[in-house]
Amino acid sequence: MSTARRLPPAAQALIAGDRRTLARLITGAENDDPGSREVLRAIYPRTGRAWLIGFAGPLGVGKSSLINELIAHLRSLRKNVAVVAVDPSSPFSGGSVLGDRIRLDRSPDDPGVFIRSMASRGHAGGLARATREVTRLLEAAGFDIVLVETVGSGQVDVEIREVATTSVVVLVPHLGDEVQTLKAGLFEIADVFCVNKAELPGADRARRDLSELAGLGSVDPDWTVPVVATSTVTHAGVSELWQAIEAHEHYLDSSGKRVERERGRLTREILALTEGRFAADLSSDPSLARRVEPVLAHKQDPETAARRWWLERRKGRA
Amino acid sequence: MSTARRLPPAAQALIAGDRRTLARLITGAENDDPGSREVLRAIYPRTGRAWLIGFAGPLGVGKSSLINELIAHLRSLRKNVAVVAVDPSSPFSGGSVLGDRIRLDRSPDDPGVFIRSMASRGHAGGLARATREVTRLLEAAGFDIVLVETVGSGQVDVEIREVATTSVVVLVPHLGDEVQTLKAGLFEIADVFCVNKAELPGADRARRDLSELAGLGSVDPDWTVPVVATSTVTHAGVSELWQAIEAHEHYLDSSGKRVERERGRLTREILALTEGRFAADLSSDPSLARRVEPVLAHKQDPETAARRWWLERRKGRA
């Protein structure tokens, strides 16, 4: 089926900017609905150029307030902006509480802003999977700036890099124990550091410490991670933060790193999708129950059971 | 290869109780070392009867202190006990900080206590994978009670049920927002509720609230989740906590639920191991790079690339 020939009506409505269609397709993508799948396939050629700005960092650093400030700033620059707030902490409910924290200080009718909260289904890689499809729908709907917020646990923070073109790591003065965390993980995902709550004492010190740390080298040796101080109380630094993000996005283009990073991400996406097909096939294999019994009786260990199953499948069909 | 015939020397030393061999094999299992693999295969027939007690709950509820009290209590009953402290928050370092919080208030030479901290490799399912193998080594070494502690993020808390025979959910008085979390997830994994810091005001109320919640039904409709109040300040409730854990373990045996739960866990373990073999094979498929390019050029969407790859492999070999 050629995707170039004719777009499904829902894809046409999406591209025309219909917000209700957008909302419906996002829900459909979350539920793995065939209609949304078809639209995602059809719009894929129109995607891939959006700036996906991820925000990582510990709870309580004020990510939501900062994103609110950033939305206001982007609107003052007449840019459209979408926000995806991912809450990985509620695997059972399927719901999300995080989105409620993004306060709509502007008219809810402003068509230049779209905010969506979602759960990441409690899986590792769930953030990437959920966000990837939603950002593609948003891009087709005309949003070429998407801010992705997540509640920070170590695992999810690392995942943000799998999704974002620019990862902003948000911290606050008096890092204390956080410096430990930083060294362990956050430091390795940052394209931009943001010291939020810069109105608090110790902000200058934190900024200097981070600049020193950033000077020691980042994941990308050709990019020096900038450190920006922001305050949602004094409204300072928000335009500087946006400039730092823009600088990184322009660097991705000029250095060729955008394509390089995207190749890595798409490789992992295709691998995960193909593995998913294998996993589904395996779960429905009628020999499964029979294979578990000797392991349950502790006559055969799980590794041996898995190795034999794999070899039999290799010999036979997939 | 028959596992019954002759045990590898390392397995013999392990079973004889050599602690240095135990420590070395655990490190080997973490690093996927072939020597440890061989031992795990050989000892598997001797495992499967240990009590694996998992502790879940938010940060700051005092899980480490509680586990310390429990170790002392178990030693007073002349029981051997091993502790595995899993820290899922440091995917990069590969190290672990959590184990340091288990204070050795007793002689470090006491052979009836073994404490090990480990990272969960930052993967979902990482807790299960890491803990499963270590607990088997511990059981072969003579520890039939293993306490598993983890830093609580929603995802990891759910995983504890995949590992533990009894899951203890630890909370503190004045739950507030935690009740929300509870309803979302923790409630569905608890075999035993523990209100720790019972010396604080509000403990009775919290206990009543939880009992009421527990009365509404648990994951297992035949088991009423007991609520125990403990204090590591007044040392109250620790023996009651252990009695509640024992009662649940005995219930697992008398009801047949131990085998039922274990069948589910082993089914998922065998599936995951077989999927892992497929994933490794897929990553080294020479056609991978060629398949990514049309997706990178946005001429083909990732789902279509994955579907075609899967169909081609099904037709050919695995």
Image (spheres, coloured by chain):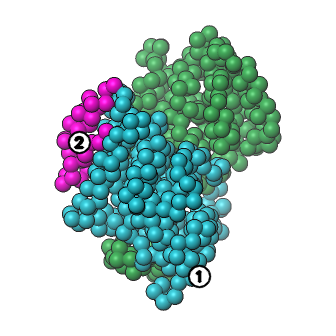
Chain colours: A green, B cyan
Q: What is the chain identity of the residue bearing mark 2?
A: B
Mark 1 — residue? B9
> In the rendered image of this protein, does residue B291 appear above or below residue A68?
below
Q: Where is residue A77 in the image (x, y as percent from the top left)?
A: 63, 16
Left or right position of A224 against A164: right
Identify the residue at image location x=57%, y=82%.
B8
Dot 1 crowding, Cα within 10 Å, few <14, some 14–19, many 20+? few
Please tell me which of labels 1 and 2 falls first in the chain.
1
- Determine whether A208 is above or below B306 in the image: above
Q: Which residue is drawn at 50% across and 55% down?
A: B84
Over which residues does the magenta segment extend? B201-229
Q: In this view, does B86 lie to the left or right of A76?
A: left
Give me the C-alpha separation between circle 1 and circle 2.
48 Å
Residue A172, x across and y down, in percent = 63, 24
Disc 2 crowd rating (10 Å Cα; few below 14, some 14-19, many 20+) is many
Residue in the image at 50% along x and 59% along y: B113
> Where in the figure is residue B182, as x and y percent of width and height?
34, 38
**Rendering quarter of residue A57:** top right
Tell me the SS state at disc 2.
helix
Q: Name which quarter of the figure residue A81 lies in.
A: top right
Residue A54 visible in the shown view: yes
Amino acid at the residue labelled 1? Pro
Residue B187 seen in the current view: no
- Magenta-drawn stretch contains B277: no
Residue B214: mark in rendering: 2
Name the side, left or right, on which A209 lies relative to A296: right
